Structures are given as structure tokens and as C-alpha cells.
Image (cartoon, rainbow, N blue to C red):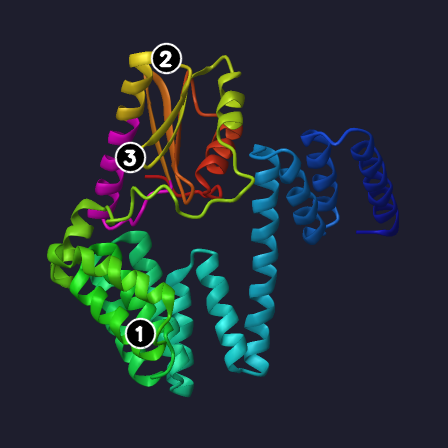
């Protein structure tokens, strides 16, 4: 960026700051964030969006800009770490690189890095991170072979890191989520040997014990998860969500578009529908759940992993579903799905906009 462009950008940022001071609207927050995008200051973009979301929870544009800033910052840090590892490889850099690959949903690449790390150093920490990366693949794709390998790798890591609870915690999480309560109890008992008297572990042990009569062998439990695509805690509505996350305003925003016939948000047993009312709204929610389940099962059987988006088009118009960390959102509209619709759905579901579609 030349001197004149930098001067112009600084002037535009000052004006955007002044407008925001006079009117702290979501639009003015987004305008200021976009000005920082122009000069490449992702830290400021993230700061402005975070402040804006505290005042305007659930705003789709601010959430989208925040996600974009995080992705760009992540890519920049990945490049730095890859360069530094070539010059001075050490545990802290290996660990951070793998963590960032996992955060950016590149678990296969994370496992490759962990394998390279272990091959070069025989560090038990590397074995744990390989297990963790494979575990992330299992939690995402729900393939039995990934779950089994992650469980076995975590056992190897536990043997090499005998006082480290993380490998056993990973074993426990895999066994718990698939309903293999015998293996879950074994893992939690070993954790209690490392941390005797830990109240959280004792509480978890009692919870596992209450389910013990319903335990399934690990391999059978993994096979069931691969077939159904549903973990035992998939209907848990208490999983972590941002405090400033509000769905209803976003649904109402979608409903203002005259081309939108219905919009819905589904999380566990909760379903919010904008557009249809009464029995029609109930039927819409049930249909969306069926579409979600069928799409997940089909993608998994074809070896495609877990879908992030589903699109269907026909004489009825367009139906799009976005699947993510916060829940599943969908829209039915006349004509094709607009880019703005796609971004709003991704915001509601907690899924950054990607190109993959099932």
C-alpha cells in the first residue's frame, strides 16, 4: 500500500470511528471493521467485531467479519510456525502448529505433523498429539476405524507419558461419547489414580457407573456410531455456545426477505421456525430434521465425512441447510439461495462459510 493509500485509509478509519461514536449501530461497527480489513489489521477487525457483538448479539455481518479475521490471522501464524520449524524445531512450535491445524479443521494435516514430530524425536507428547488429531477426525467424521485408532494411540501415549492425564482423558471422551461405559470407567479409574480425590473426576465416575449396565463393547459401539452418525450426547443442549449468540433476531432478519418462505434453527429438541405457523411450523421442523439425518448418513456412507452444507433445488425453489457447532440452520426460498443467506445460515450454525457441499 503506497503512502497516499495509507493516508486515505487512516482518514476513512477516523471518520468511521467518529460515526460509531455518534451512533453505535451494528452497521457502523461493521463499517469500521471493514476499513480495518482494507489495511490488513486483523487484530483491530477482531476487536471491533467483539465489541460490536457485545452490543448487538447475533449480528450476522459482525459475526462473519469476525470469522474472516480469525481465519486470516490463523493462516498468517501457520506460515510463521512452518518457517520457524525449519530453522529451529522444538516442542513448543510443534505443539502450536498442530493445535492451529486442529483449530482450522485440518486434522489430517495435524496428524501428519505429529507423525513427523514423533519420527524425528520419539517424544511421547508427539504421540499424544497424533492421538488427539485422529480423535478430532473421529468426532467429525464418526468413522469407527478413526475412533479405534485414536483410542489405541492414546493408550500408547499414556504408556509413554505415565503422569500425564491427557491421553486417558481422550480415551474417556471417546468411550463416553459412544456409550462404551466399561472402557469409560476404566479410563476414569486410571485418571483417579493420577489425581486422587479430584471432585470433577469423582462426579464423572459416578455418572459412568450409573450407565454401566447399558455398556457396549468399544468396537460394537464405534460401529453403531458409524452407522447412525449420532453420539450419545448429540441431544445435549448445554454444550458451549458464545454468550452473545442470539438466534431469534437472525431468523427475523431472514424472514424480512420477501423471497424467503421459511427459515429454521434446530438444536437438540429445540426448533425455532420463522414464516410458517402452528402445525405447518411443526411439520417444517420435522422435515428439516429428516433432511439433516439423511444427509449425514449418506455423506458418511460415501466416505465424505460430515457435511457442512446441504442444498436442494427444484420447482419448489431452493432449500439449504447449514450444519455447525452451535446447531443446524435452514432456509427455503424462491429461486436460488443468495450469498447473504448462506452467510447468515453459517453464522447461526457456527460454521465458517466453506465450499464443501453434500
> Residue drawn 35% across and 73% down?
197
Q: Is residue 266 above or below residue 72?
A: above
Mark nearer the N terminus (3 vs 2) = 2
Span colored in magenta: 288-308
Mark 1–mark 2 distance (CA, rounded to whole Å): 52 Å
Q: Classify mark 2: helix, strand or loop.
A: loop
Contact, CB < 8 Å: mark 3 with mark 2?
no
Q: Is residue 296 magenta?
A: yes
Work out whether residue 253 can be spotted. Answer: yes
Mark 3–mark 2 distance (CA, rounded to whole Å): 21 Å
Main SS, magenta residues: helix
Which is more foreground, mark 1 or mark 2? 1
Looking at the image, residue 67 sits to the left or right of residue 169; the answer is right
Q: Is residue 219 above or below residue 255?
A: below
Q: Which mark is residue 192?
A: 1
Mark nearer the N terminus (1 vs 2) = 1
In this figure, which residue is indicated by the disc labeled 3? 292
- Coordinates of residue 281 in the picture (x, y in percent): 33, 17
Mark 1 burial class by Cα count in 10 Å: few <14, some 14-19, many 20+:
some
In this figure, which residue is indicated by the disc labeled 2? 277
Q: Is residue 198 above or below residue 248?
A: below
Q: Is residue 123 magenta?
A: no
Q: How many marks?
A: 3
Amino acid at each position: 500500500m503506497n503512502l497516499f493509500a495509507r493516508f486515505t485509509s487512516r482518514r476513512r478509519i477516523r471518520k468511521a470511528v467518529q460515526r460509531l461514536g455518534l451512533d453505535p449501530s451494528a452497521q457502523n461497527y461493521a463499517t469500521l471493521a471493514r476499513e480495518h480489513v482494507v489495511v490488513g489489521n486483523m487484530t483491530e477487525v477482531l476487536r471491533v467485531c467483539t465489541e460490536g457483538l457485545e452490543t448487538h448479539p447475533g449480528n450476522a455481518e459482525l459475526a462473519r467479519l469476525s470469522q474472516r479475521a480469525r481465519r486470516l490471522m490463523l493462516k498468517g501464524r501457520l506460515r510463521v510456525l512452518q518457517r520457524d520449524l525449519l530453522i529451529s524445531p522444538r516442542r513448543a512450535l510443534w505443539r502450536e502448529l498442530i493445535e492451529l491445524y486442529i483449530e482450522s479443521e485440518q486434522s489430517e494435516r495435524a496428524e501428519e505433523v505429529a507423525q513427523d514430530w514423533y519420527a524425528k524425536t520419539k517424544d511421547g507428547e508427539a504421540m499424544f498429539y497424533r492421538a488427539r488429531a485422529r480423535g478430532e477426525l473421529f468426532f467429525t467424521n464418526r468413522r469407527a476405524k478413526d475412533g479405534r485408532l485414536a483410542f489405541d494411540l492414546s493408550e500408547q501415549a499414556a504408556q509413554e507419558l505415565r503422569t500425564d492425564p491427557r491421553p486417558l482423558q481422550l480415551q474417556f471422551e471417546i468411550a463416553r461419547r459412544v456409550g462404551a461405559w466399561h472402557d469409560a470407567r476404566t479410563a476414569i479409574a486410571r485418571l483417579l489414580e493420577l489425581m486422587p480425590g479430584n471432585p470433577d473426576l469423582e462426579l464423572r465416575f459416578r455418572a459412568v457407573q450409573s450407565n454401566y449396565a447399558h455398556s457396549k463393547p468399544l468396537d460394537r459401539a464405534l460401529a453403531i456410531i458409524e452407522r447412525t452418525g449420532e453420539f450419545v450426547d448429540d441431544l445435549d443442549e448445554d454444550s458451549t455456545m458464545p454468550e452473545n449468540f442470539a438466534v431469534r433476531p437472525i431468523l427475523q432478519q431472514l424472514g424480512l426477505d420477501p423471497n424467503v418462505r421459511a427459515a429454521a434453527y434446530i438444536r437438540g429438541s429445540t426448533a425455532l421456525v420463522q414464516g410458517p405457523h402452528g402445525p405447518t411450523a411443526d411439520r417444517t421442523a420435522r422435515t428439516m430434521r429428516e433432511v439433516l439425518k439423511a444427509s449425514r448418513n449418506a455423506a458418511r456412507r460415501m466416505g465424505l465425512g460430515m457435511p457442512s452444507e446441504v442444498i436442494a433445488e427444484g420447482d419448489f425453489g431452493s432449500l439449504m441447510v447449514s450444519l455447525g457447532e452451535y446447531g443446524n440452520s435452514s432456509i427455503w426460498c424462491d429461486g436460488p439461495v443468495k450469498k447473504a443467506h448462506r452467510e447468515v445460515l453459517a453464522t447461526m450454525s457456527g460454521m465458517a462459510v466453506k465450499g464443501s457441499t453434500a
